[in-house]
Amino acid sequence: MHDGCLTGVVRSDSNDSGSGDVIRPEVRRAVGMDRRLYTACATVNLRQLQQFAAVDLETLNQLEPSSGKTLLHVAVESRRLEIVRYLLANRPELVDKTYGPQRLTPLHLAAENGEADTIRAILDEKLKAIKEVTGTGENIFHLMAKNGHHEAFRCTYLAYNPRKHARKTDEDGNTVLHLSVMRRSMEGGRVLALNSLTNFSNLQLMRFIFKEKVVRVNAHNNMGKTALDIAIEEHNHPEFGEIIAALRDAHCITGRVGRFWSRREAPDKHLYGVLNTTVVAAALIATLAFSELLNPPGGVYQEGALAGRAILSTHRLFDVFLFFNVIALLTSLAIVVMLSTYVAFTRDRLICRWDVSQTLTDLSATCLLIDYVIGT
C-alpha cells in the first residue's frame, strides 16, 4: 500500500480478472488519460470501467489525447452496445461531443457503421441529436445512405419518422437518394465498382426511399444532377444496370434541361424505343412544315401575274413565318437522316446523336408552334 501511495496507484485486492490498478483522481489529472479506460470500452470490460467511475465519475468525461474522442466515441466505434448504454446512463452529455475536422458525434459514427441498436439507444436518450450534422453538412440519414446501410436507415426512419431530417440535403445539394446511388469504395484514389452485396443493399435502400416517398425522385443537386444522372454516368459498371432500371421504374428522369450537349443517356433497352419515337415525331413535324409551305396562311393567288404567290406575302409577319417554317423543316429532316443511320455508329456516338436529336426535336417543335401562332 505504501508503494502505491508513492506512485499514485492503488492496487485492487480483488482477484477479478476485470480489475486492476486504479489511478487516483489527482494523479490521473496530472499525467493525462489512462489508456485502460479505452481498452475497457473497446473490449466490453464493463467492470473495469465501473471501477474507474467509482473512484472519480469525471473519468468518463476524459478525451483521448491523440484524436479527441470521448469514451462514447470509442464504444460506438468498437460496436460495444453494453458500454454505450452504460455511458449514456451515467454521462448523457457525451452525446453532443464531437471530434475531428468533420465534427463527428457518437451518433454519426453509429450511422456510418450502420448500427441500428446503437442509433436507437442514443436517440432514446436524446432525440434532438438526430438533427446534428457533420462538418460537410451530412446528418445520420446521409451517412447511412452513403454507406449503404439499408436496415439501419429503415429501422431509424420507421421508429422516429424524422421526415424533415431525411429530406434535407448535404452541402452539395445531394439527397439520400443521390448518396445511395453514388456510393463507392476507394482504394488508392481509384474508384472501384460496387460488389454484388453492396449493390443489393443499395437497391433495397432505393426501393425503401421510393416506397416511403422519403425524397422527390427527380430532385436536383447543386450540379443540376438527378439520381438517374449519377447512375448513368457510371453505366460502364455492369453493377449499375439494375440501379438504372429501378430508377426508371420509379419515373426518375435526367436533369437534361438546358444541357443540350450533355452525353448522359445510357444505351439501355429504353433508348431504342425513344429513338423510334423521335424519328416518328420528326417525320410528322417535317410533313406539317412542308404542307404549310405549299399552303401558306391566307392561301395563294390562283390567277393573274401573281398566280402561285402567297396572298399574305406582303404582310410584315410573313417573313417571320417563313423563317421559322424553314427551320422546322430542316431540323426535322436532319433528325430523320441522323437517326436512320444510328446502327452504323459506336455506342458513344449513338448517345451523342440521341442527345442532339432531342435538342433538334425541341427546336423544330417550337418553330412549328411559332408558325401556328403567326398563321392564326
Image (spheres, grey):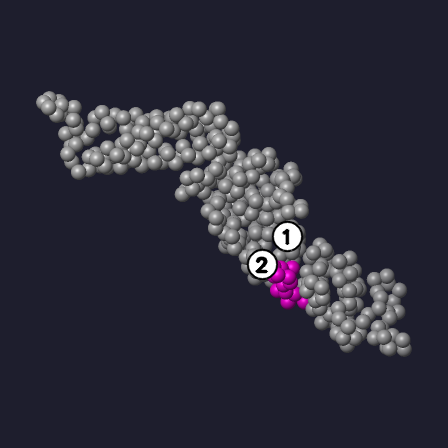
Position of 258 with respect to 203 (left or right) is left
Residue that mark 2 sits on: 134
The quadrant of the rendering that contains the C terminus is: top left
335 inside magenta stretch: no
Q: Nearer the viewer, residue 166 or 67?
A: 67
Q: Residue at x 42, y 27 (%)?
A: 339
Quadrant in the rendering for residue 98 = bottom right
Residue 49 locus on image (x, y percent): 77, 65
Q: Residue at x 58, y 48 (%)?
A: 145
The amino acid type of the residue labelled 1 equals Glu
**What segment carries the magenta color?**
90-106
- Mark 1: few, some, or many residues within 10 Å (few <14, many ≥20)? many
Task: Give the answer, above or below, for where 356 lies relative to 32.
Answer: above
Q: Residue at x 19, y 30 (%)?
A: 297
Residue 267 locus on image (x, y percent): 51, 31
Q: Nearer the viewer, residue 260 or 231?
A: 260
Asked whether the viewer can see residue 166, the reply is yes
Residue 363 locus on image (x, y percent): 34, 36
Where residue 112 is drawn, which disc sits there? 1
Q: Residue at x 23, y 34 (%)?
A: 321
Label 1: state its secondary structure: helix
Position of 209 with respect to 359 (left or right) is right
